[in-house]
Amino acid sequence: MTISARYQHGSNVMTAQPDGLVASREPVLLPIMAPRLQADCEPNGRISLALWGAGTLGTVSFSQLTGPFVYGPNRVIGKAGGVYVAQTAPAMVIRGVRGNRVVAAKRAAWWHTPEAGDATARASRNGDRRSFELAWGSLIIEQRGDDLVLSVGASRGEAEAALSLSVETIVAEADAYVQRCDRLPEADPVLRSMVIQGTHAALSSIRQDEHGKFAGLAAGQAYSAPARTYYRDGYWTLQPLLQLAPEIVREQIRLLAVGIQPDGEAPSGVILSGQAQAIAWDKFRRGDRVYAGEHLRQGDWWSDHFDSPLFFVLTLGDYVAATGDLEEAKRHWLTVTAILERYFAASGPDGLPKKPNHDRDWADNVYREGYVSYDIGLWLGALDAVARLGKTIDPELSGKAQFQAELARLNLDRALWMKTGNYADFVNSDGFAEDHLTLDSLTLLRYRATSDKRALEVLEAVAKRLESRSNTEQPYGDWGVLCAYPPFKRPKDVRAKSAFAFRYHNGSDWPYLDGVYAEERLRRGLPGARYALTRWWEMCLANGWAGPVEYYSPPFGRGSLLQGWSGLPAHVAVTYRDVLLAGDDDKPASNALVLDGA
């Protein structure tokens, strides 16, 4: 929804504290993601509850908490009471309140059409406990003195087991989780709080099924119906997990491998819904002509994305580099081979693959055909990964990948370097070039596709044109790092949200791309990384967004809260902690732009 924008000096909705938590005098929405339970909690008296793999279960109203408030991952503490979420079971407690009305969901998601008789929950009451059984899950609330305990489950049994946790246990688990996210305690309040919230975004993406088994990395809080895990979102989300939970990365690789076709094609994501949701989703998919055309198979979320197979190879390469577990690469080598053959076939004699004219890569509102800088950067990263892994597993494919990488690097500048001093977003087969500067073209730098000279030129261009504090042509002042500027030349190349300048792929700030940019500066010893790492988080604080956002811009507001890949800046900050703690010569701006409205 379009919302207005205004500058306010010293009037942030939220303020970072020295302990890394965030204070607010007014209640703001707390997004909640635990391994099973998901919720949107409004401390002034309302919470909506959902379950990974099942969908929306219901809404509970309660007597409001009073401020001031202190926010942390999955936790808010008020003047008297607070919200605490367990980690070992789908349960939570709201302390210091009384439960009021419960409204069970009529359907699991907007697309869900329950069978006859399934839309009405079976409600029961036993003293201070109220239970609601739906065809796709259960919700229970129980008043324990001044504490309101809530639990959810795929079955009543799971919800009742979760409800058996004591209030003290729930609070202890919630507090321990906040401490686990505090990975840079030496930092100043803004940087420390960003790292806490970014780590939370990554850790909370780790989902479980009702048996405690890993059930994919969620892209964010808004991705539970149908439950799905993405190749690209997952790749950026799992970067900190390579150190924090490498076994989860291994299991994610195995889940993603299931979605790859024998010819190397892969969807945007793999659907991981529970049984009831899976049946309902497939019924909807098959009955809708548009969705059936986009989601070709029951397990596909948006079939045939150009970047997905490359992210699978990159994930595998990163995992082996972090763990030394070459056996995992051997397990998937036939899939890796199929992927490379697919892109060899899409490449010409210059070694550079051409993307078909569709909107199926990360910029899924943009029709990019031909040479696409972002995709070619991924291709070169994948080639390098196969060249490394294949030395032991498959020397012939390793040599072929190395040759192709050398060929592609040799021809890259001829294909994509522009007189404007940057790599084009894309160059069509007919010669048209969308020559504006994009942050996603930094995949070329991340995977060493360019010379050092070119890399420095690109980073200088980004600092001047995409950092809003330096770009006086864009009309909104100092608000973050644009993902693209100037806006797309041709209306026919963009659709939906990206059809508007400064919106979505057409110029919004995407924190995950900020992390990619900051890391390239830090890797080369350049100042100015802190701006990219923290300006987006300063905007979250200014506007009362209690969690890493998917994207935002002044004229259009924010995307989803608690987005997994938006934890990448936190990972970069921890990786380069010594440099950042020593100080950055390029200090961030102090003004905060508040996006007003709803």
Image (cartoon, helix red, strand yellow):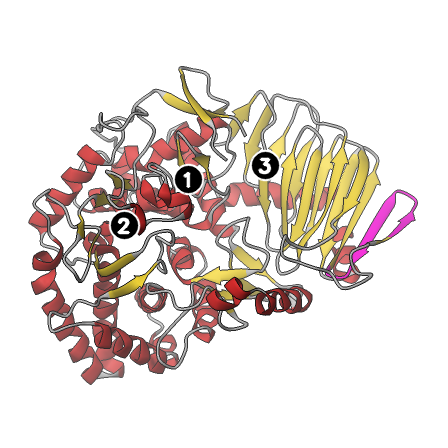
Crowdedness near tag 3: few (<14), some (14–19) or many (≥20) residues, C-alpha within 10 Å? many
* Three-letter residue code for mark 2: Asp
In this picture, residue 2 sits left or right of residue 382? right
Label 2 sits on residue: 440
Q: CA distance from mark 2 to mark 3?
A: 30 Å
Q: Quadrant of residue 392?
A: bottom left
* Three-letter residue code for mark 1: Val
> Which of the numbered marks, if any, corresponds to residue 195?
1
Residue most toward the right?
A: 127
Q: Is residue 19 above or below residue 105?
A: above
> Which of the numbered marks, if any, corresponds to residue 122?
none
In this picture, residue 401 sits left or right of residue 513? left
- Taking depth in this image into account, of 472 and 19 the one nearest to the observer is 472
Q: Is residue 124 magenta?
A: yes
* Three-letter residue code for mark 3: Leu
Q: Is residue 30 above or below residue 280?
A: above
Query: Residue 383 location in percent, x, y?
Result: 22, 70
Q: Judging from the image, what secondary structure is the residue with disc 1 in?
A: helix
Examine the residues drawn in magenta and state their main secondary structure: strand
